[in-house]
Amino acid sequence: MNKEVVCIVCPMGCHIKVKKDENLYLGYTVEGNKCKRGKEYGIKELTNPTRIITTTVKIKNSHLRRLPVKTNEPVAKDKIFECMKVINKVSIKAPIKVGDVVLENILDTGVDIVASRSM
Amino acid sequence: MLNYDIVVIGGGPAGLAAAIEAKKNGVKDILVIERDRELGGILQQCIHNGFGLHVFNEELTGPEYAEKFIDELKNQGIEYMLDTMVLDITEDRKISAINTENGLMNIHAKALILSMGCRERTRGAINIPGTRPAGVFSAGTAQRFINMEGYMVGKKVVILGSGDIGLIMARRMTLEGAKVEAVAELMPFSGGLTRNIVQCLDDYNIPLLLSHTIIEIKGKERVEGVVIAKVDENRKPIPGTEKHIECDTLLLSVGLIPENELSLKAGVNIDPRTNGPIVNESMETKVKGIFACGNVVHVHDLVDFVTKESKKAGKSASKYVLGELVEKEEIIKTNADEGIGYIVPQRIRMSNVDEKLELFMRVKDVYKNVKLVIKADGEVIKEFKRKHLAPGEMEIISLNSSLLEGKQVSNISVSVKGA
């Protein structure tokens, strides 16, 4: 399993090559990174890439029709579209406070969908 | 006539930070005027995260970042008017504003802070040939439709321009079920942040076509497709490279222009490189008592830097009202030399600078492993090593005031030099 990623830890944007190597303690060789943080990022991108999802849900009784929401923790990258399907079914009513949970434990990931603003 | 110590025009991140900082520095009567129905400005439609890493040490979404400042403004008891449009300002800081509740209002301010932000460049600004069908949006307009109003703007999308808003919208449209066919960029490099190229395009396998532009829009009622072509080093389309891409929507992310119609009415002079007011170390314009901050001065890529700059404007405006700003002094001009596009501030009076003199700037090209060389009247006073510089990433350098103490300097220049 090999992968080339562009590191986003800092603005340098190093092109990192990550290769599996079971003889090593970390289990991977990382090339092209100019710092330690790049190495960690490269391995994470290969083994378990995650992202915060930011999107909206329907809201009623408010001056806007959509409430911005986000996952309170990163979710696995390959679950993003599945999560979107679930989030798009949510419809809530104002008032709501920033940080309020809109949907609990999405797809059994342990991650909640929370409001990004009060409305 | 209504009277205030400080009036702030625009209740986005710049205006909010400036007003709060002015209040904290001892000015009581402050009014923020906002034309939208709520405070927060464009942050309210920027629902993605990545805001606040510098100011709060955490990654916030736009609305979360805005809410922190809106809450603070309210806690400080600062007055604000919504749905209110400023029609005119004068050199002696008289403001005409209008809303449906009070009608026309004449307001006088001891100090005025301009924080009107910027506007997107449109199809007209870049003259794309072709028909004029529905389905051509500026990226920010599409963002507002989708994120706030709940309208999906299209299903098959091409984006012109790889500035941050274009990249963010590529991901946003994809998440909501649209197919983004490509992002075309005229320049040989992206104007957006690297993290956005990775997280918005690479993550979703959206092709970024560098050195490409759109040479024709097709469709009668609705966009039916666009013709893209490769461009040469002079940014002219290369014959024979044309390609038709079928789509129903074209988003334009082709630059932002500071919104200075009002500034001009007050006699503020504009820097042709930034398209914003020429300001001094205190973010004060040529007109005494009129300050400016945020995207109205120069377009920022991070809101955190807007906050930083706007705090300076708010603090300076409060000093002006309290009679603490040093007005008369020799002025140092800043000069964008080799490789530097512009520098803000353009004028410096050292007496008003605290320990550090901060210069905001943009480079003209992508550079690796270079030095930023700071010269005072032609003599090198400081060098900063930089591993990576790009036009899409604003650079801030911080000079110790002691470097200039006791020297009769009339010019500070910054240039890029190979290491």
Image (cartoon, coloured by chain):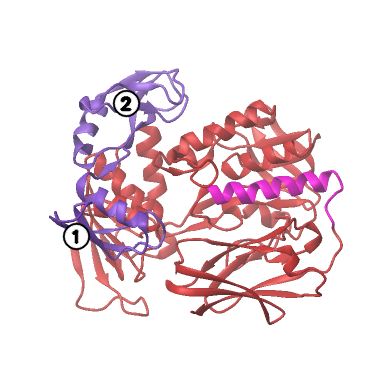
- B293 or B59, nearer to the observer: B59
In the picture of the structure, the residue carrying the numbered disc 2 is: A112
List x then y, in percent, for residue B187.
36, 70
Give the drawing colour for chain A: purple
- Give the labeled residue for mark 1: B245
Residue B248 makes an appearance in the image: no
Q: Where is residue B419 in the image (x, y as percent from the top left)?
A: 48, 79
Determine the residue positioned at 65% across, 37% down: B33
- Tags 2 and 1 both on a single chain: no
> Along the line of sight, which residue is nearer the eye, B17 or A19?
A19
**Chain identifier of the residue bearing label 2 in the image:** A
Image quarter of the N terminus of chain B: top right
Determine the CA span between mark 2 and mark 1. Answer: 39 Å
The chain holding disc 1 is B
Residue A93 sits in quarter: top left
Report the span colored magenta. B304-326
